[in-house]
Image (spheres, rainbow, N blue to C red):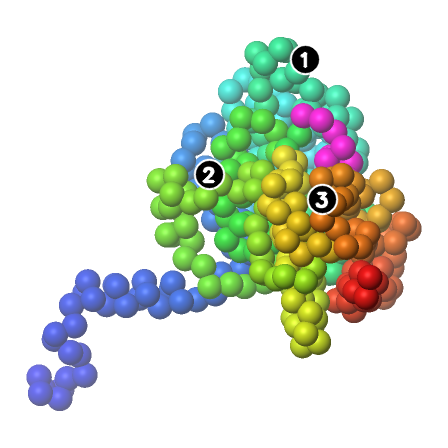
């Protein structure tokens, strides 16, 4: 092939080619799971005291592959498998955190964490108070949780209420790809223990996010903090849907359907269950005058109940109707074929919207 017939353009430099390749990669959608995986990797790079362990998180990369590749990249001393003993996993993490490390542990499935709850409630949550502030526990307990994946009992619980009710713990749950990265980085950097709930059904969801830029902004402290901060997922004026984690996408779907009927719903993503952002939530309810709390967990004695109480106490004179809830039913998690009836749906949310005393 002669120079005149060559398909290679001599004006295109290697640097230009690399820039084009980078731009192409940036335009690729990023999954929720990839954002978590990247946050873990970046946490390991940023701080040598960070270690990751749990059941099957090493060679396998976790049941949901959230730790995929971390052992190969960082070695088995920093990302490793443990015996099938959740209480032992948490207990070991407590000892490591007391001695200057930052363990990030995985409970594999929501209900698998119950055998470790005594460790969490008796030691993880109380250590700073028990030692009058002399000892902190900078550790993260990652829990894949909630439904929408056709799982059976012990694999799809919404157990956030147990941890939110336990003083001394922070409780986070992201609902979008960007927050998955930012909130996990913040959890790893926190000097207090964080229970980090990851909605299983969102692991494969995708969004256009530049994780490299997000990491740079986080490390330069240019990104807005997420801890204790709710976000307005959708602006609206007629009523407020207050939700978190796996129910945010459902609430957004309901808001889209309501808009077709002329009702403009605002959607608030709580993000940080503990600490809780009363300011953002109540500002929205005072603006709209109506509110519905949406969550997959059962309604009785729940996080949803607490949110209703806080809104009712703080926004009573702004309310045009009682604050309602759309939640899972007060039953053990049902069989996979029945979960669609158990979980909040856009239709159930819209039924609640119709009950907000619009003619009052």
Distance (Cα) linking label 1 and label 3: 36 Å
The answer to which of 229 and 63 lies nearer the viewer is: 229
Secondary structure under badge 3?
A: helix
Query: Residue 110's quadrant in the figure?
Result: top right
On the image, the x and y values in percent for residue 211 come to 42, 53
Residue 242, percent across and down?
Answer: 69, 52
| Element carrying mark 1 | helix
Q: Which of marks 2 and 1 is in front?
A: 1
Residue at x 62% of width, y 47% of height: 283
Q: Do the residues labelled 1 and 3 touch (CB within 8 Å)?
A: no
Of mark 1 and mark 3, the one earlier in the sequence is 1
Contact, mark 2 vs mark 1 (Cβ under 8 Å): no
Image quadrant containing the C terminus: bottom right
Task: Confirm whether residue 101 shows in the render.
Answer: yes
Relative image position of residue 81 (x, y in whole percent)? 61, 38
Q: How far apart are marks 2 and 1 (CA)?
A: 28 Å
The Cα–Cα distance between marks 3 and 2, rounded to whole angstroms, is: 40 Å
Residue at x 82%, y 52% (from the top left corner):
322
Circle 1 residue:
130
**Pointer 3 and pointer 2: residues touching (CB < 8 Å)?**
no
The answer to whether 279 appears left or right of 10 in the picture is: right
- Badge 3 local density, few (<14 within 10 Å), some, or many (20+)? some
Front in this rendered view, residue 170 or 37: 170
Look at the image and say whether residue 161 sits in the magenta stretch.
yes
Picture quarter with the N terminus: bottom left
Magenta stretch in the rendered image: 159-168
Q: Residue at x 63, y 61 (%)?
A: 237
Which residue matches tag 3?
315
Q: Name the residue under label 2.
A: 43
């Amino acid at each position: 092939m002669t120079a005149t017939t060559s398909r290679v353009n001599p004006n295109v430099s290697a640097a230009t080619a690399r820039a084009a390749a980078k731009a192409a990669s940036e335009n690729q959608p990023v999954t929720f799971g990839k954002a978590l995986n990247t946050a873990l990797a970046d946490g390991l790079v940023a701080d040598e005291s960070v270690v990751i362990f749990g059941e099957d998180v090493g060679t396998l990369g976790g049941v949901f592959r959230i730790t995929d590749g971390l052992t190969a990249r960082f070695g088995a001393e920093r990302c490793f498998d443990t015996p099938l003993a959740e209480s032992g996993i948490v207990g070991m993490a407590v000892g490591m955190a007391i001695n200057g490390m930052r363990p990030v542990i995985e409970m594999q499935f929501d209900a698998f964490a119950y055998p470790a709850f005594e460790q969490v409630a008796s030691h993880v949550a109380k250590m700073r108070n028990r030692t009058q502030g002399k000892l902190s526990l900078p550790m993260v307990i990652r829990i894949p949780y909630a439904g929408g994946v056709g799982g059976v009992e012990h694999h799809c619980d919404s157990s956030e209420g147990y941890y939110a009710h336990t003083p001394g713990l922070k409780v986070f749950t992201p609902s979008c790809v960007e927050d998955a990265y930012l909130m996990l980085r913040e959890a790893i950097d926190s000097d207090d223990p964080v229970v980090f709930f990851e909605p299983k059904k969102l692991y494969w969801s995708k969004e256009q996010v530049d994780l490299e830029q997000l990491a740079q902004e986080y490390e330069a402290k240019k990104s807005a903090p997420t801890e204790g901060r709710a976000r307005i997922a959708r602006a609206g004026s007629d009523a407020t849907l207050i939700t978190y984690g796996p129910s945010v996408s459902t609430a957004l779907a309901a808001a889209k359907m309501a808009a077709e009927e002329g009702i403009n719903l605002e959607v608030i993503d709580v993000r940080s269950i503990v600490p809780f952002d009363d300011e953002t939530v109540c500002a929205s309810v005072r603006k709209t005058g109506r509110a519905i709390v949406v969550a997959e967990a059962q309604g009785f004695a729940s996080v949803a109940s607490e949110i209703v109480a806080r809104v009712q106490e703080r926004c009573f004179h702004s309310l045009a109707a009682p604050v309602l809830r759309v939640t899972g039913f007060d039953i053990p998690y049902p069989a996979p074929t029945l979960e669609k009836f158990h979980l909040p749906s856009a239709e159930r949310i819209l039924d609640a919207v119709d009950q907000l005393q619009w003619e009052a």
